[in-house]
Image (tube, helix red, strand yellow):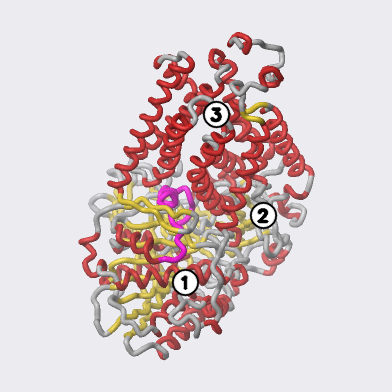
Amino acid sequence: MSRNSFKRRTENGWDLFKDDKYEKSKFHRPMPHVHFLGLLCLILIVFSLVIFIEKQLPAALKIEDENKHPETFIAERAYNVLKNLTKIGPRIAGSYENEVYAVQVLKSEIDNIMKDANENHVIQLDIQKASGAFNLEFLDGMTNVYQDVQNVIVKIGSRINSPHSLLINCHFDSVVDSPGASDDGASCAVMLEILRVLSKSTKMLRHNIIFLFNGGEENFMPASHGFITQHKWAKEVRAFINLEACGAGGREVLFQAGPNHPWILETYSEEVPYPYASSLAQEIFQSGIIPGDTDYRIFRDFGNLSGLDFAWSANGYVYHTKFDSVEQVPLGSLQRTGDNILALAKGMSQGHQISDIEKYQPGHLVFFDFLGAFVIRWPMLIADIVNLSSVIFSLYSLYGNFKSAKITDGLNNERYSRKLVGCMIIVFMAWIISVISTLGIAALLTCLGRTMSWYARPFWIFFLYVIPTLVISMLTLLLHAKMFNKDIETSPWTLFQLYYDAYQLLWTIVLLLGVVLRLRSSFIPLLWVFSAALGNVLKSTLFGKWRDSKWLLLHISVFGLPFVQCFYLIIGALYLFIPIMGRAGSGSHAEFLLSIFVTSIFANLFTFVVPLAILVRGIERIFSLLTGLFLLSLAIIILTPLGFPYSGETGALAPQRFMIAHTHRTFHDISGKVVNESTGYWFADMDPNSPHSVDRHVPDMKNAELVNKDCESYLYCGLPYLVPVLTMIWKTHWLPGPPPVILKPVSMKILNRTITTVGEKITIKVDGPTHIGVMISPVSGVEIESWSLPTNEPLAGPLWNGRKTYFIYYAYGLEPVPLVFSINFKTPKNHKEPIMDLAITSHYLFGPGKASKEFKQLINQFPSWTAINYWTASYESWIV
């Protein structure tokens, strides 16, 4: 059979692949489409198994099991504590619920534990009230000033009287309108049960463990700052464990570790029974992609400590909503977290490293768990050696293919190199084309008003974006092969090997870049590179050129490990990422962002599936099947209620979020005269469908207007931002309405203005409710040189009309304390004009002043599939 006979063409491009004469030849598309379909079914099975494994939780122990399991964490007891804590309701810092009731619940539990403690232990309780200030480079940046935040602190030690301690931290306060069961009441309940288990043990602790129940994390971490910078026990802390949540239940993920001190992670790897950790998660979180922060930052930056940061991430739909109730927290999650943290606390406190912490400081670890079974970790030096060895191994295996192509197809090194570079380019282009195509799908859904259909039903992601990614990637390679590799199309194995090698070489380059950039997430390209190189060597050794179904089994076996591990990481990322899209702001363009994210990660996952299309006979049948599934799902989403993005059903909660402030706005001119005043409801748009998704239920919403021009005229758009998130939540709406009831109006007084050698010093007094914001923007030519607040220096935020802005977040405890501070301005010589724009916001987050009768009537109109955080606020500005 001559090679020329394979070059016949017809008008239909697919006719070549459907020619019966060549269908029978093993050298021309040797893989039946049924085999490839079987591979796709296997992939679906793997997806299902990984999701099943990911959701597994240990059996929860009950109080009646305690005799059978002494010195063991009992989930039911922790659950009962959590129920008592959440019965209080929302626990906003500064409220009676948080400052009195919650503290009483914690003290009562701790007192009972102390009474029943074994005599080998020395347990001390302390209630701290702290005041201070610090700069926080989070979101748009702000200066956090706090007064009388509370901490409940317990230290358990022994008569050894060690001067070294391990710190374990949770927070018992919550955001407005949320019972805070998962965030972070569950962590506090877990810590109390761990304290109980340790206190009843007959074994003495080598080093102390300090349990910090902090009462102000949701105020952007002032309570942990107050402890680590001021408390009498802070100086003896050598390492810490921070417990957080951005979801309700599931498995707690270790997403931050260090800095340095690899022994901490090694202890985790050796001690915990149910590991779940990844240096990839750490790099993603610390990059700022995820809009959140934890007390880990405070202990690291202000305590100069190293530690571990854990968080629940499953069911993030209820995070910071009214639905974050005790019913959302699985007993199995409490058991798992309790078992892990108890084992870790014992391992760290009994270890010798804490007593000589500096000796074990140097080093970083690459770490990840395999399906929750065990943790793989190695130092960066070993990672570099392994990575570079894999790069060399990969290049060696590619060189072998160069020689093979020359022998079997007469391709010399130069021709093979040119073709390989061309294939690498088209592989990259396949990713670009896939992204563009799925962006087109996202645009279509946006135009049709069907965005975020995957929010309540994540399985739509597979049909909307995963299937098109696979189809377009395969189609791009096939078209490239037809058009640019005609001379070797009669040698499908060589053609396949070219695209295989192109993917392998691209992954090798990525791995090499990871080594250069010191990325600890380089273990991902390492898995693909090593598997691809190994596959190349085994295939050439065992099969040569003639290959059959056994070769496909080898191909599946070689790439099974990286495929499973990467999908395991992907599913964890999606569990976190999808709910975040419901609170990332309308300006995040969630549909487009998710399409790019899903296309990118699944294009990488299908790295060594896509080239198989070169070998498949009847590939058009696969395309027809996948395209049909895509079109059918698209029709269902567009035409049926199954495309509705939200759910208020118990057990399948995925509410749409609303943040609403009933606001009074007042604007003064340079003389102090009121020149503009308005009242109404301010809506912070939390996702692309906000706020008009509820027009049918809340008729007044049709009158809501997009806030636009005010952002040019007034500092922070003339709106009462609770925290500086203008760059993230910049798209908001204003609905005119009746004036709110302000029980304690905020007041601003300029106590003193003094001329200095460089400009002017202004002293300001601000009085109002427990939560106040101060926004400052010096006019052009004027700078803030310093201020009296106890921070290193004033922290500037985003520019407004080319001018610097500063945001001061102020909160106090039960007793009202005004904020008094001075600012030193540096002004141009003979400056007679105004110095700054000044705005003060007040926020009434709890109590009788939280909502008026009219405001509550508006809130009650919202449907059951919404979650609303609401309060009363004011905004008042001056030109000083």
Q: Does residue 426 appear anywhere in the picture?
A: yes
Residue for point 59% across, 10% down: 2
Kind of residue at disc 2 = Pro
In front here: 111 or 136? 111
Indicate whether residue 4 is drawn in magenta: no
Q: Which residue is mark 2?
A: 736
Q: Return the residue at label 3.
A: 547
User: Distance from label 3 to label 1 (Cα)?
Assistant: 52 Å
Secondary structure under tag 1 reads helix
Amino acid type assigned to the residue bearing label 1 in the image: Gly
Which is nearer the N-term, disc 2 or disc 3?
3
Q: Which residues are magenta?
A: 272-293
Percent x, y of residue 472: 61, 30
Discs 1/2, front: 1
**Is residue 717 positioned above or below 110 on the image?**
above
Which residue type does callout 3 highlight?
Arg
Are the residues flagged by discs 3 and 1 in contact, CB closer than 8 Å? no
Please tell me whether the stretch drawn in magenta is mainly helix, strand or loop.
loop
Q: In the depicted view, which residue is nearer to us: 177 or 567?
A: 567
Q: Are marks 2 and 3 in contact (CB under 8 Å)?
A: no
**Quadrant location of residue 858?**
bottom right
